[in-house]
Structures are given as C-alpha cells and as structure tokens.
Amino acid sequence: MVTSKSHSNIALIKYWGKQNNKIQIPLNSSISYSLGKVYTVTRLIYQEKKNKKLSIRIFFSGKEKTSFLPKILEFFHRISFYCSYLRNWNFIIETYNNFPHSSGIASSASSMSALALCIMKIEKELVSSLKEDFFFEKASFLARLGSGSACRSIYPGLVVWGYHKSIKGSNNLYAIPYPYEVHSIFTKIENTILIIDDNPKKILSSKGHQLMNNHPYARERLKCANQNMNRLISILKIGDFKKFGELIEHEALTLHAMIMTSYPYFLWMKPNTLNVIQTVWDFRKHSNKNIYFTLDAGANVHLLYPIQEKKFILKWIYSDLFFFCKKIIESFCW
Ligand code: PMV
C-alpha cells in the first residue's frame, strides 16, 4: 500500500488542444501555479493477481465509484508499457479531494498526479537506486498520460509543460519547474477560488481539446499562446503585476472564446461568472488594487492578488462577491 498527496494547479497560460490525443501531446506550452490547500490524497493498495484479468476498484470519499473506472482503466493501459511491474497486481484506489470534483478546479490534475506519485512509490520500492530527479520526471510523464494538466501538479510553484523555444528544458513529455528568475512579488500570491457552480460540468475538457482539431482559430490561438509565454517570462522577471494580470485575464477569456467558437459550441460561464468579472473590473478601476481573474474549463473564478493586499481584498470579496458564489475557497499559489 502506498499513499500520496498532490495539489491542484491553475494555468496562467492555458494548455488547449492536443497534437496527439492518445499520448497527450499538447498543441502549446502552458504554465501554472500549484495551489496550496486544494489537494487530493490517494491510497493505492496493490494485491497479487489470482488470474490474468486486471481488477481495479475505486473509492472516492469512501464510496465506490464505478463511473471513474473507464478513465482509470485507460490510464493503466497507457502506462503499462512504462511500468510493466503493474501487470502482476490488482488495485484498490482510495481517493479523497478536499474540493468539488469536475467543476473547473483541476481535480483530474491533482488526482492523476497523486495516482502517478503512488505508482512511482511502488517503482521506488522495487528499484531502490532510483534517482530523485527521475522519480519526479517519470511521475510527471505518467500523470500526463492520465490527464495533460496533471503533469504540472507534480511540482509546487510555477511549472511549465510543453516545448517552448524560450524555456530551457521544456518538453512535451513531462513538466518542469519554471527554470528562470522570478520577481519576489510572484513568489507569494493569493488565489481565492469562487465556486459559482459545484455541479460536475457537462462538457469535459477532453471534448474541448478534441474540438481544437478543426477549430477555425486554432492557428491564431497557438501563435497567441507562444507570444504570451514570451511576454510572461519577462513579466515574471520584472515583477509587473498589472501586465501579469492583464495577460492571465486575456488567456482565460481566449480559452473560453475558443470553446464558444468551436463546433459544436459551448458556454462554460454562468451569469454569476460574468457578474464576478464585471465587479472585479469595477473594483479595480476605483480602488487601483492588483486583483485579476483567471478561469479554467468551467464556471468558477480564480482571483489572484499579491499577499500584501490579502486583508483588504479578502474583506472586499466576502462583502461584494459573496452573493454570486456557492462557496469561497481561500487558496494560494504554492
Ligand atoms: O488536463 P485537462 O485535459 O483536464 O485539460 C486542462 C485544460 C485547462 O484546464 C483548461 C487548461 C490548463 O492548462 O490547465
């Protein structure tokens, strides 16, 4: 039996679209912050197989979840070539999230990352000489085969996945910690998550990625993501929070614009998503505070602001945004 904990992450530059669906190669490079206080804990129990057939049972918050099985079976199938030792066992997966799943907080990221870390712990038991760097690189590689963005949840802090010519070591197979200098303002950022809708979303991101294949604006999106990465590298160095905020808002709205202009088309935002965005923009205009939003594949809003502003901004969030939300999660970029 092995246990691992992994945190969710929020992308600043969004991974959207795949060059290859089966092996999860992204169209563009992405960068995220891992999130404090928002995590999955997974326990993987492995038992010797009685016959050749693989059996996996999954328990989510103590209840058996057969609906998760197809994704997990596909994951075990994809990784079997890289982890041949797994063929000897059946598995029981017990997993717990401290936040709602499938609602735009990357639950697939933290859960696939926690599972990949469990598998690497088994590998470490079998190969005691396994190096630490290899442990995390392979964990990220395996997590990617479960859910693309999960490969970034292996590390804390700023994490890059996908080849970008300006980022040394970046590649499509596994994520790496952001390798360059970061201004101190970006080392302590608050992230308050406003849960607008806690129902599992109807259109999964896997469907959205697929829709990029024939998307009329896919080429422009790719260009824009690459440029944004270049801009972000210098913003992170200089410490310009305003430029940082404008860039992440632009990225979030571009992601949603892509889903709205795909065919079939979808809308992840809810009326209260827009209410929050408008209220944040109004507040920023009259207070001059550094508070910006980003969105994931869903209706919920992540607000990012420097830790120095925490007291004032949190007070404002609870007074002016509270009524648009079902729940508020106080997290931080970790
Ligand atoms: O990892 P997936 O397949 O759930 O895709 C995640 C995509 C976004 O969350 C929208 C963006 C990202 O980079 O995390």
Image: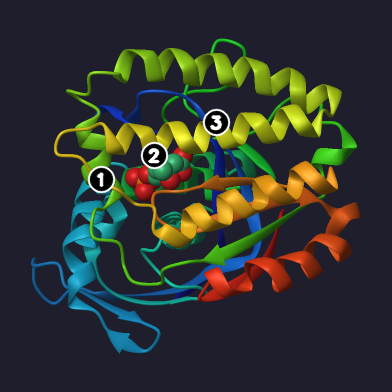
The residues bearing labels 2 and 1 have C-alpha atoms spaced at a distance of 14 Å
The answer as to whether callout 2 falls within 8 Å of ligand 1 is: no
Task: Look at mark 2 in the image and give the residue it sits on.
Answer: 256
The residues bearing labels 3 and 1 have C-alpha atoms spaced at a distance of 22 Å
Q: How is the image coloured?
A: rainbow
Residue 37: image x %, image y %?
Answer: 66, 68
Specify few, some or many for label 1: CA neighbours under 10 Å numbering under 14, 14-19, or 20 or more.
some
In the rendered structure, the answer to whether residue 214 lies left or right of residue 42 reads left
Between 177 and 81, the residue placed more toward the observer is 177
Mark before the other along the chain sequence, 3 or 2:
3
Ligand 1 placement by image quarter: top left
Quadrant of residue 234 within the rendered picture: top right
Quadrant of residue 56 within the rendered picture: bottom left
Q: Amino acid at mark 1?
A: Ser
The answer as to whether callout 3 falls within 8 Å of ligand 1 is: no
Tell me, yes or no, if residue 98 can be seen here. Answer: no
Specify few, some or many for label 2: CA neighbours under 10 Å numbering under 14, 14-19, or 20 or more.
many
Residue 38: image x %, image y %?
Answer: 59, 66
Residue 28: image x %, image y %?
Answer: 42, 23
Q: Amino acid at mark 3?
A: His
Between 147 and 230, the residue placed more toward the observer is 230
The residues bearing labels 3 and 2 have C-alpha atoms spaced at a distance of 10 Å
Which quadrant holds the N terminus? bottom left
Specify few, some or many for label 3: CA neighbours under 10 Å numbering under 14, 14-19, or 20 or more.
some
Task: Look at mark 1 in the image and give the residue it sits on.
Answer: 206
Q: Amino acid at mark 2?
A: His
Task: Look at mark 3 in the image and give the residue it sits on.
Answer: 250
